[in-house]
């Protein structure tokens, strides 16, 4: 299934992630869905957009802004699909639910907080 995101929603996603980065906090998938008001299938669209952004950041050799989006569950980590995506990008290798994943995610979040991004077009 090919999923597309509108320019307005893409710009909104980048703005929300930039605000979270500047304020040094994380966003849940649910909060991001509510703020962006994505059309159905909203979660699929958000996931595709976050994976596209991760690929763009990896290609530019930048910290992955999509790491700022986490589950609201007890783990406070991104969903399994995030770790599968970053593994495909060559950024992480290992089980998506272990100590190594949590440690890698924590260090990536710090890298995102400390990095200054140029505003790019998709």
Image: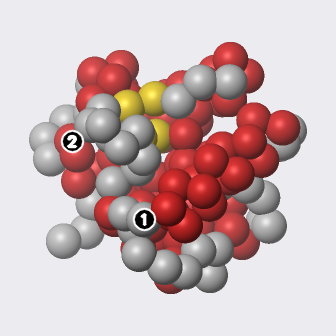
Q: Is residue 15 left or right of residue 62?
A: left
Label 2: how many Cα within 10 Å (few below 14, some 14–19, many 20+): some
Q: Residue at x 80, y 67 (%)?
A: 61
Any part of residue 81 in sight: yes
Q: Is residue 55 left or right of residue 78?
A: right
For residue 105, above or below residue 20? below
Label 1: how many Cα within 10 Å (few below 14, some 14–19, many 20+): few
Q: Residue at x 13, y 41 (%)?
A: 40
Q: Which numbered disc, 2 or 1, marks the residue closer to the eye?
A: 1
Q: As rendered, which of 49 and 96 lies closer to the eye?
A: 96
Q: Is residue 94 left or right of residue 6?
A: right
Cβ atoms under marks 2 and 1 closer than 8 Å: no
Residue 42 tag number: 2
Q: Residue at x 78, y 65 (%)?
A: 60
Any part of residue 6 in sight: no
Q: As rendered, which of 8 and 15 lies closer to the eye?
A: 15
| Residue 12: x %, y % from top left | 49, 28
Residue labelled with disc 1: 98
Give the number of marks: 2
Q: CA distance from mark 2 to mark 1?
A: 28 Å
| Residue 16: x %, y % from top left | 54, 26
For residue 81, above or below residue 45? below
Dot 1: element? loop
């Amino acid at each position: 299934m090919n999923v597309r995101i509108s320019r307005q929603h893409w710009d909104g996603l980048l703005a929300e992630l930039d605000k979270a980065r500047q304020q040094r906090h994380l966003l849940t998938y649910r909060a991001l869905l509510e703020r962006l008001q994505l059309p159905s299938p909203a979660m699929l669209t958000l996931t595709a957009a976050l994976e596209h952004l991760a690929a763009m950041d990896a290609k530019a050799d930048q910290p992955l802004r999509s790491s700022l989006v986490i589950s609201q569950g007890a783990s406070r980590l991104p969903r399994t699909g995030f770790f599968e995506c970053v593994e495909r990008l060559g950024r992480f290798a290992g089980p998506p639910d272990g100590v190594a994943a949590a440690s890698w995610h924590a260090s990536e979040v710090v890298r995102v907080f400390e990095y200054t991004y140029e505003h790019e077009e998709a």
